[in-house]
């Protein structure tokens, strides 16, 4: 599952910054600065210009790092050339005046401590109007939770746009008021699976998936995308099957043929299947 998600992101990531910037700027009224102050209280709106530019922060890792912390392999080096093209396209369409977009890249080091601080540093310098990015979901979550309450010299609330953070625990719009996910969150998969179960009349199921924490003695390893996807599915599927212990994990980095066979047999019998 993680490999499939990585391949999907790889095929689409080159068009993502262009779409983000165009959507960002088309959503402004008369080319004014993007603000979400209406959630709280309004402040003076300034026209976009070289004197009052839009500061867009891309908090991304300089290096791809460990797969479990950066499952989609996002880096500054991969994003920067495409963002440059996106900025040129925005100017070509005359959405904003020339040289009125200031793009900043900051290395988050794939850290849930350092990652949020790079955004805070730009906020206190009054150089933050929008955040596009994060590769590590544990760095994204606190920023998306706090950004509605961030204030600088001319705004209240900073929008966060991201291609990660697909899990159901980030679906709460009251908690993550200014976060926009451009990729389909896992609730879309959940709805599709539930519709399939209803259509087919299925009541029993079992799941086998990769989890990097499984069979590992390292507690610092974060939960993987496969686990987070299944965690988004299971609560709703429980209404149909009332099955709690119907999943089996394996670690693809510690693959054991006999254990996989055992898991397949147990899952098959648990879900009323046959195993040969």
Image: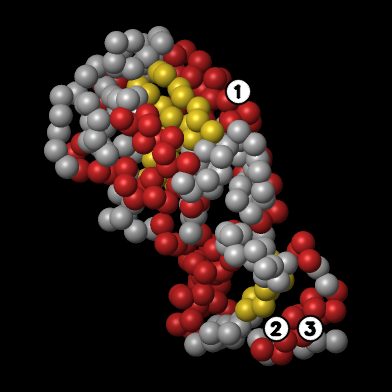
Is residue 4 in view? no
Percent position of residue 81, x then y: 60, 23
Q: Which residue is mark 3?
A: 262
Give the distance between the C-alpha atoms of the residues marked 2 and 3, in whole angstroms.
Answer: 9 Å
Taking the image as shown, residue 218 lies to the left or right of residue 130, namely: right
Front tag of 2 and 3: 3
Q: Nearer the viewer, residue 87 or 143?
A: 143
Locate residue 251: give its quadrant: bottom right
Taking the image as shown, residue 18 lies to the left or right of residue 121, namely: right
Mark sitting earlier along the chain (2/3): 3
Q: Are marks 1 and 3 in contact (CB under 8 Å)?
A: no
* Mark 1 crowd level (few <14, some 14–19, many ≥20, 10 Å Cα): few
Residue visible at 77% across and 62% down? 253
Which label was assigned to residue 149?
Answer: none
Secondary element at tag 3: helix
Q: Which residue is mark 2?
A: 267
Percent position of residue 268, x then y: 72, 85
Residue visible at 60% across and 65% down? 219
Vertical comparison of 219 with 87: above or below: below
Quadrant of the rendering where the N terminus is positioned: bottom right
Q: Which residue is mark 1?
A: 81
Secondary element at tag 1: helix
Give the distance between the C-alpha atoms of the residues marked 1 and 3, in whole angstroms.
Answer: 47 Å
Vertical comparison of 130 with 199: above or below: above
Quadrant of the rendering where the C terminus is positioned: bottom right
Residue visible at 70% across and 54% down? 3
Give the distance between the C-alpha atoms of the residues marked 2 and 1, in whole angstroms.
Answer: 46 Å
Mark sitting earlier along the chain (1/3): 1
Locate residue 174: give its quadrant: bottom left
């Amino acid at each position: 599952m993680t490999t499939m998600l990585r391949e999907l992101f790889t095929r689409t990531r080159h068009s993502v910054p262009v779409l983000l910037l165009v959507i960002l700027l088309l959503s402004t009224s008369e080319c004014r600065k993007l603000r979400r102050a209406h959630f709280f209280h309004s402040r003076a709106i300034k026209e976009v210009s070289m004197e009052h530019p839009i500061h867009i922060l891309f908090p991304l890792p300089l290096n791809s790092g460990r797969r479990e912390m950066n499952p989609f392999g996002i880096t500054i080096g991969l994003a920067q050339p495409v963002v440059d093209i996106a900025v040129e396209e925005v100017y070509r369409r005359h959405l904003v005046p020339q040289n009125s977009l200031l793009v900043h890249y900051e290395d988050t080091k794939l850290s849930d401590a350092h990652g949020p601080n790079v955004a805070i540093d730009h906020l206190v310098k009054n150089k933050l109007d929008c955040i596009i990015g994060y590769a590590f979901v544990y760095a994204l979550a606190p920023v998306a939770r706090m950004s509605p309450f961030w204030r600088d010299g001319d705004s209240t609330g900073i929008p966060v746009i991201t291609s990660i953070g697909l899990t159901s625990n980030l679906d709460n719009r009251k908690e993550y008021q200014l976060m926009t996910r451009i990729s389909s969150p896992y609730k879309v998969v959940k709805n599709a699976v539930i519709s399939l179960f209803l259509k087919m009349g299925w009541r029993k199921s079992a799941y086998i998936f990769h989890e990097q924490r499984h069979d590992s003695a390292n507690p610092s390893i974060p939960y993987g995308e496969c686990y987070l996807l299944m965690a988004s599915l299971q609560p709703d599927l429980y209404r149909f099957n009332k099955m709690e212990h119907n999943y089996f994990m394996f670690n693809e980095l510690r693959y054991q043929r006999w254990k996989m066979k055992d898991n397949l047999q147990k899952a098959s019998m648990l879900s009323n299947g046959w195993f040969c």
